[in-house]
Image: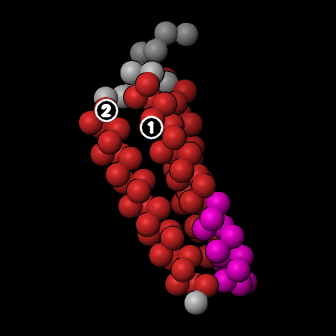
Amino acid sequence: MAIQKFEDLLVWQKSRDLAVSISNNISEGFDRNSNADFARFLYIALSSNSEVRSMLYISVRLNSIGKQEADELIERTNEISKMLHGLIKSIKN
């Protein structure tokens, strides 16, 4: 199958799915009965965020995305990581 648009790229599809996983895990964890469960789901969201970052590095190596664009998106994943770590810390205290 020829790639007609960026949505056809497997790396884009995987990154999109992982981004959905991040928000779904935050949502599911929030509705759990304990902070320990919430934290567990936040750690899963954190792992999905790391996978998105990894996919961006892979995309640059495959020339699927420009380095500048990837760097901007990687910075966003770093910000999300900081927010998730902060939230985990706040509910553990």
Which quadrant, please, contains the N terminus?
top right
Q: Name the residue carrying label 1.
A: 56
Q: Residue at x 49, y 24 (%)?
A: 9
Q: In this view of the protein, can residue 35 be seen by the observer?
A: yes
Q: Is residue 68 above or below residue 87?
A: above
Q: Splitting the image into 4 quarters, where does residue 31 fall?
A: bottom right
Q: In this view of the protein, can residue 20 be seen by the observer?
A: no
| Left or right of residue 75: residue 16 | right
Query: Picture coordinates of residue 49 (x, y %)?
Result: 52, 53
> Looking at the picture, which amino acid does disc 2 mark?
Lys
Q: Tag on residue 88?
A: none
The magenta stretch is 31-44
Query: Picture coordinates of residue 52 (x, y %)?
Result: 51, 45
Q: Is residue 5 above or below residue 34?
A: above
- Magenta span includes 57: no
Query: Picture coordinates of residue 55 (x, y %)?
Result: 51, 37
Q: Residue at x 43, y 61 (%)?
A: 80
Q: Residue at x 59, y 60 (%)?
A: 45
Q: Name the residue carrying label 2.
A: 67
